[in-house]
């Protein structure tokens, strides 16, 4: 399996999501954690970009970090998968390498 | 699988100190081997036993100590980063002529080689930071 890219910054604050998407090869996965989860919510100016990225990448979002920000799973863009910390661990082991975009 | 974790941010400063702890807990619960947790940059501040967070707040250091005790984890603090920030064990305090040490139970101070070794020996190295 290709690489797992974790993104922990809000796309409204930094460009790490763009950078990760630019470097991620087809089949690589993106995991949004911490403030990175703001990219997972529907109705924002980046939502269409995230939806488009689903064509080439599985995109996951860390559920506890969604609820920690007062949001819930039904704010999350359709097609993204919500995982817990156990799911985070599973992704780390399923993909060959982990790149943490900080 | 053999995993290692790198923590680059201090507690109560950035969420990554919490994320690293939650990730490590989940990994040991799933039966993975944690080869090492390496604390670097401000992450070394996780390793002081003298911090007193409010009683209704989480105590990140104590949680690491408890997790290390329960699962025999190797928690390593970078020596150069630690000395800059006043994190000392008994040996270093003596060597530097300081009047006390503050390292928390379950942590040890060592060099950057320990991070390199963790990267080589582990199947995955997961980095948490800002």
Image (tube, rainbow, N blue to C red):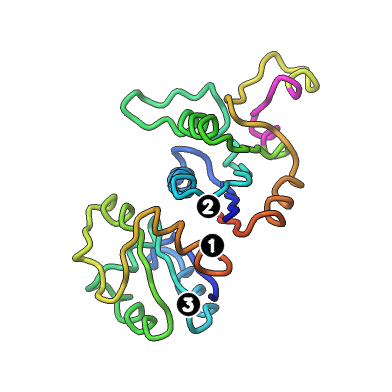
* Subunit of label 2: B
Q: Give the x, y percent position of residue A98.
A: 55, 64
Q: Give the x, y percent position of residue B37.
A: 60, 44
Q: Give the x, y percent position of residue B55.
A: 34, 23
What residue does disc 3 label? A21
Number of marks in picture: 3
Residue stretch rendered in magenta on the structure? B82-92
Q: Name the quadrant of the N terminus of chain B.
A: bottom right
Considering every residue shown, the one lying at the far front of the view is: B31
Between B9 and B106, the residue placed more toward the observer is B106
What residue does disc 2 label? B128
Tell me: A3 left or right of A7: right
Find numbered disc 1 in the image and state the secondary structure of the residue it sits on. Answer: strand
Whichever of callouts 3 and 1 sits on the residue coming sooner in the sequence is 3
Discs 2 and 1 share one subunit: no
* Subunit of label 1: A
Above/below status of A7 relative to B115: below
Tell me: B117 left or right of A19: right
Residue A100: numbered disc: 1
Residues at marks 2 and 1, CA–CA distance in whole angstroms: 7 Å
Tell me which secondary structure the magenta stretch mostly adopts.
helix
Tell me: B61 left or right of A76: right
Find numbered disc 2 in the image and state the secondary structure of the residue it sits on. Answer: strand
Residue B86 is inside the magenta segment: yes
Tell me whether the residue at label 3 lies in contact with that at label 1, contact meaning CB atoms closer than 8 angstroms: no
Above/below status of A31 relative to B89: below
Residue at the image point whose x is 50% and y is 73% from the top: A20
């Amino acid at each position: 399996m290709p690489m797992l890219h974790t993104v922990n910054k809000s796309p409204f604050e930094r460009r790490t999501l763009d950078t990760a998407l630019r470097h991620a090869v087809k089949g690589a996965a993106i995991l949004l954690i911490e403030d990175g989860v703001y990219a997972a919510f529907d109705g924002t100016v980046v939502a269409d970009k995230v939806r488009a990225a689903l064509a080439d990448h599985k995109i996951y979002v860390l559920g506890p970090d969604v609820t920690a920000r007062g949001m819930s799973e039904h704010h999350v863009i359709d097609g993204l998968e919500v995982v817990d910390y156990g799911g985070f661990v599973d992704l780390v082991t399923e993909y060959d390498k982990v790149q943490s975009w900080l | 699988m053999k995993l290692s974790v790198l923590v680059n941010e201090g507690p109560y400063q950035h969420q990554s100190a919490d994320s690293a702890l939650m990730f490590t807990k989940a990994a040991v619960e799933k039966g993975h081997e944690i080869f090492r947790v390496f604390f670097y940059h401000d992450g070394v501040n996780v390793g002081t036993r003298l911090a007193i967070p409010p009683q209704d707040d989480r105590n990140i250091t104590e949680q690491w100590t408890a997790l290390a005790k329960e699962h025999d984890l190797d928690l390593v603090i970078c020596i150069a980063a630690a000395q800059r920030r006043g994190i000392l064990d008994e040996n270093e305090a003596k060597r530097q002529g300081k009047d006390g040490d503050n390292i928390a139970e379950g942590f040890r101070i060592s060099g950057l080689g320990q991070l390199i070794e963790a990267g080589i020996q582990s199947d995955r190295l997961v980095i948490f930071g800002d």
